Image (cartoon, grey):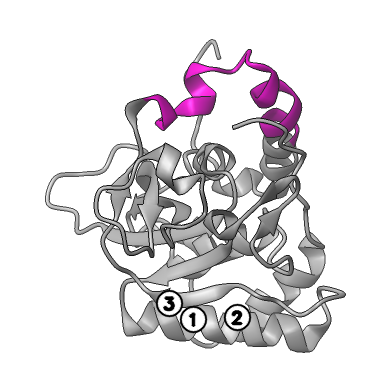
Amino acid sequence: MTNRKLLYTVPFFVIGVVVVAIYAESFSMSSSDQEPDVDQIPPNTKLETATFGTGCFWCTEAVFQQLKGVHSVVSGYTGGHVENPTYKQICTGTTGHAEVVQIQFDPRVIAFKDLLEVFWKTHDPTTLNRQGADVGPQYRSAVFFHSEEQKKLAERYKQELDSSGAFEQPIVTEITESSTFYPAEDYHQNYFNLNGSQPYCSFVIRPKLEKFEQAFSDKLKKKASGK
């Protein structure tokens, strides 16, 4: 992935107000109040799945990996018509797939609504098939829901954000049922952690993560001693 620019960061305060207004009655306890607050997932815990597309999956993966309650984040492709697509095929923009991350999370620690909040705040959902310098349907903004509850939450959140005027332009995020997910090639996985000195990581992902960490400090995993 080359010629990528820093992704757009939306007004955090406005989105925070909207999410509180939408879910105050439905969720009486926020994820930060839930117990247990653990990075290690206990045995027999029932994990749930979320799938998001926000443009470059290197950036998206690096963001969601840091959240408490997130067990795994896998970069991959979904939403297309070609079986077992390769990155080279995806880059043509003709397979119908989006670059996405598929997240396994512990709903006792972090709720889907909280993942949605991170989703909306860390990319521009108003640019059709584009994020920064990345252009093509593979970079579209998308929520691939895994249940009716996820669908309802995503659709309501999108509607309320549009109504609130959080963005100058209408939100074009695709909200569609999840389909076959294909993990990306190995060299795409855990990309930022393994390639932190690479120019794209230094100049694009790292500044994005610094903003994210400031905004979501209460939801981040504890870093190991000495790091």
Which residue is at the front of the view, 50 or 128?
Answer: 128
Residue picked out by circle 2:
157
Magenta stretch? 187-207
Q: Is residue 192 magenta?
A: yes
Q: Is residue 122 magenta?
A: no
Element type at mark 2 = helix
35, above or below 68, in the image: below
Mark 3–mark 2 Cα distance, whole angstroms, equals: 14 Å
Left or right side of 22 for 99: left
Residue picked out by circle 3:
176
Q: Counting residues from the N terminus, which is met first, the one under dot 3 or under dot 1?
A: 1
Q: Quadrant of residue 124?
A: bottom right
Q: In the rendered view of the protein, which quadrant contains the C terminus? A: top right
Q: Amino acid at mark 3?
A: Thr
Q: Position of residue 12 (x, y in %)?
A: 77, 61
Mark 3–mark 1 Cα distance, whole angstroms, equals: 12 Å
Q: Quadrant of residue 213?
A: top right
- Label of residue 153 in the image: 1
Q: Position of residue 60 (x, y in %)?
A: 55, 45
93, above or below 209, in the image: below
Mark 1–mark 2 Cα distance, whole angstroms, equals: 6 Å
**Residue visible at 19% across and 59% down in the picture:** 46
